[in-house]
Each structure stands twice: as structure tokens, then as C-alpha cells.
Amino acid sequence: MVTLAHYLVLSGVLFAIGAGGVLLRRNGIATLLGIELMLNAANVALVAFSAFHGNLEGQVFVFFVMAVAAAEVAVGLALLVAIFRKLQSADVDRLSAMRW
Amino acid sequence: MWAEIAISGLKLAVIAGMLLTVVPVMTWVERRGAAFIQDRLGPNRVGPWGLLQPVADAVKLLFKEDVTPAHVSRGLYFLAPAVAVFVAASTFIVIPFAKGEGIQVFGVPLRGLIVAPDLNIGVLYLLALSSISVYGIVLAGWASNNKYSLLGGLRSSAQLISYELAMTLAVLGVLLASGDLRLTTVVEHQAKLWNAVPQFLGFLVFLVAAFAETNRLPFDLAEAENELVAGYHVELSSMKFAAFMMSEYINMTTVSALATTLYLGGWQLPGIAIPDGWLGLVLSFAVFMAKVGFLLWLFVWVRWTLPRFRYDQLMRLGWKGLIPLALLNLLWVSVALAQGWL
Amino acid sequence: MELAIFYLVAAVAVLSALVAVAHRNPVVNVLSLIVTFFCVAVTFAMQGADFLAGAQVLIYAGAILVLFLFVVMLLGAPVVSGEETPRPIQKTLGAFLAAAVAAGAFFLFSSLRETGSNLPAAGNTTRALGRLLVGPHLFAFELVSVVLLAALVGALVLVKRKH
């Protein structure tokens, strides 16, 4: 019997992998992928709770998370493309012009 | 449970059989139809009226040397045609082919010739699959390690995404009118009046978007022989090329079946109530196939009649032409529903 | 049987998520993330959220990741994946944090006392979701459309070349 705990563990592990991706990679695209993974982990948790309580509000929230994630990816990738045109590299560590 | 699995297997076999027949028949229709439109005869040597020509084509493609160019990404190179065919064929499990009320096979009711009758998100499933089909083309373009392929692949996927929007908006009108995402409900809703009549604009938008979605002329710039050296599948030979050609014809059949279900009343005949039972099954199946056949002929007809769109004209038509029209259609449907006309 | 399916789907999801963040080649990253998103869609379907399962495939796997793939292909994957190794402090801290979150999630949630099973709710969520969106959550719905418009305009402005 698949319980709430199963889905929450899955969500936590996916979130950790996404966070690891954001923290450990210097490639802009990999960072954005990590962010998408974290958002999906949150979605899994939301749907799990929604099914647990029998309440559809959680699913409405997931709907909004998907929409906002799409918007954020569009802007993030546009930024990445603009940066790449300038620097010829997607390495986020090279974006240090404004550092102290 | 085993009876239900057996029934699903039988329905899948019917669909697979239908698809495997449609592809060779369509290649024959394409070549003879093209010939007649161009005032010539076309292939009529192989078998009576050239009916065995597709067999000859298949044999030729099978025996062609399978050339794999250097420096291709092997995994993606083999994955792309597989994705294209798989996605194209998977769309058929939610399309209702025939009315099968009151029939019992192995003691379990048949509930119509549709593999997944209870899928609540029927239309959403179809839209999701059509957005996955973009990957087959993009991956083929990328994996071939060839500038022309990549360009063709990217152009084609941009075209697919743009026209997918127009198609979705047109379909939304139908969903509003029938009130449910299930295709069986949509077909039953059209018992008195086909959706193409009140939603003529939506039907037009859907057809044009369907031409663009299947990469058929007048929107086939991405795979044009004389424009882009055959575009994203220039490096694919033998069975991989055959797989892409197959996926194109299967896609054509899918959108024709979808257009029939959503706009032309599916297996319904206007004014005539199809009876239950085996007679009704055969009759409704024949009606459905006739409509799909007509739309497939329309695809061939338009291909050999109209010139090709240039890429920027294509994108302009999709974004600035079809999307506003589809939104207009949506507005009209909402007004009609609110006033109680539909 | 449902448990077996869940374990299979979860294993595939975690594995492909690991490949998605760890592999050098950006195209492989994106493709394995597609697999992860499919698995997540399956978990949605297993809990009766049918509309969200379809929307997950349509939006995430079918639109967002296509956008990613476009950018990767246009920027040229070999150039994009050329990166030096991250600094040692970044590696240790990052790995430690990620492992801590994963372990924390695992041990914390697996000791939950709730034993009710997450059975699927009554299937047809589309209609109910629609009612909720234009009813109690209308304001958020309208705001999201403005957010999407802002993102659209922003993305166009960012990549516009100055002539």
C-alpha cells in the first residue's frame, strides 16, 4: 500500500538531487535544470498531500507552480542566451563583474 | 481481468492492422493521385493499377545499405525514428472508431471500438503526445551531425510548436461545446449536428494546423527536397528513413481521425441513428473510415495543388493569422453556449 | 502491485534525475530530465490527479524541455559543457547539503505515523479544477496570466539584438 510517506520521500530525494545540481554545477543550463527538478519535487509533495486530504486545492497550487515554472524557464534561458552571446561561455562563475 | 486484457489486445491488433494497411495504401494513393493531378499516369506496372508498388518500395528500402555517417550520436540517431513512430501510433488508443454498445466479447461488454474508453483526459492525452512528437524531429536533426539537418530540425520543431498552439485553441472550442475531455462524449454530442457546422472557423484552423503539424505541403519546408536537401532526415537511410516516412503517414491518419472525431461527428451519421450490436459496429466503423479516407485524400490533393510557404510566411500565418482566428472561434462558441444556441 | 509500480517508477525517476544533474553532455541532461518528468506524471496519475498528469507531460516534458533543448542546440553542446571543475569548498558544501536534505527527507518522512493509503480520488478532476480556478482562485488565475505575459515580453527583450 503506497502511503503519503512514500511520495514525500520521493519528493525529498528529488529536491535534494535538484539542489545538488544547482550547487555543484557551474554550467548555466544544468543550474536551470536543477531548479526545474526542485519545482517538480514540490509538485509531487503537493499532489501527495492533496490526495491524502482529499482536497483539490493542492492540485490547483500545482497548476500555478507549472505556469510560473514555465515563465521562469523562459526568462532564465533568455538570460542565458544573452550572456552566452557576450561571453561565449555558459559558465556562471564568469559572471563576476559586479563582485565587490 | 484476463478477458479485459484479451479485449484490449484485440482492439490494439485491429488498430495496428489498420495502421499497417493505411501506410502502404497511402503511398499508393499519393503517387497515383499526384500523377493524375499532374496529368500523367503514375506507377501502374507493378501489379494491377500499380497496387503492389508500395510492396516494391518497402522491399527497396529494406535492402538499401544502412549507412551510418561518422560522428553521429549513436544513441540519439537510433532513438529519433523510434520516438517518431511510437508517438504517432500511441495516439490511437483514445480515438473511438466505432459504436459498440450492447456487444459482449468473452463475457465482458465491449463499450465501443476504443482501446481506452475510460481515459478522462482523452483530448489532453492527445495534445500531450503531439508535443512529445517534436522530439523525434529535433533529435533526428541534432543527431545527424550535419548543419542542414540541424537547421531543418530546429525549423520544423519551431513550426510544430507554433501550430500546436493554434490547434489547441481550436480544440478548446469543441471541448467547450461538448463539456468533457473524453472523445466518446464529444462524438455522442454530435448526434444531431456535426461540430464543423457551428464551429466552421475552428474546423478551418484545425485543418490548417493539422497540415502544419504533419509537415505536409504547403508547410513542408523542413523536409523539402529542393530547399534543404531533405532537411532533418537527409542522413537517415534505409529503415530509419522508412520509419520517418511511416511516422509521417501515421501522423496524417491520426490528425484525420482526430478531425473526424472532433468536427465531423466521428462514427455518427447525420440524422440516422446507428443501431447497437455487431451491425452497428461494422456500420459505424465504415462511416468513420470513409470520413478519415476523405480527409486523407484532402491531404494528398492539397499537397499537389498548392505551392510551398516560405518559412517566415509560415510562422507569420501561424502566430498572427491562425491564433487570432482560433480565439475568435472560442469567443463565438462561448457566446453561443451562453445564449443557449449550441 | 501498486507498491511495485511505485518503487519502479520512483527508482527510474531518481536515477534519471541523477543523470540529469551529473552528466557532462547537456543534451543527455535534458533527455534524462524528460524521463524524470514522465515518472512524475505517472505518480500523479497513480494518485488520481489525471489532469495534472496530462498537464505535466504537455507543459514540462513537451514545452519547457523543448525550449531547453533548443537553447542547448543553438548554443552548441560542446561549447556549453566545457567547464572547469568547481572549487573544492563549493563541492564539499554542495555535496554535504544535498546529502543532508536527502537523508533528512528519507528518515523524517519514513517515520510518519499516518498509515492511510493515498488512494486515487474520484477520477475526473478537470471539471472540479476548472471550477476552483474560476471560483475561489480567480485572482491568482488572472495574476498568472499577467506573469506569463511579463515573462514573454521579458524573454523577447532580453534576446533582442541591438541593430
Image (cartoon, rainbow, N blue to C red):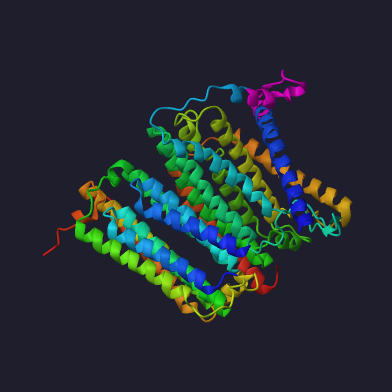
Task: Indicate whether B89 appears above or below C154.
Answer: above
Which corner quadrant holds the N terminus of chain C?
A: bottom right
Q: Nearer the viewer, residue C80 or B325?
A: C80
Decide if residue B13 is on the left or right side of residue A6.
right
- Going 57% across and 30% down the picture, which residue do you hit? B239
User: Residue extending furthest top?
Assistant: B45
Asked whether B285 falls inside the magenta stretch, the response is: no
User: Does B40 appear in magenta?
Assistant: yes
Q: Position of residue C25 (x, y in %)?
A: 35, 45
Q: Is residue C33 left or right of residue B284?
A: left
Above or below B244: residue B286 = below
For the question of whether residue C152 can be seen, the reply is no
Q: Position of residue A23 (x, y in %)?
A: 28, 61
B19 displayed left or right of B209: right
Q: Does A63 sit left or right of B271 as displayed?
A: left
Quarter-wise, where is residue C18 in the image? Answer: bottom left
Residue C74: image x %, image y %? 34, 44
C6 up-or-down from A89: above or below: below
Labels in figure, total: 0
Q: Which of B96/C153 is in front?
A: B96
Q: Which residues are magenta?
A: B34-59
Which residue shows up at 42% across the image and 68% down it?
A12
* Residue B64 makes an appearance in the image: yes
Can you tell which quarter of the image residue B195 is in? Answer: bottom right
Q: Is residue B125 above or below residue B136?
A: below
* Residue B22 spot, x, y in % from top left: 70, 37
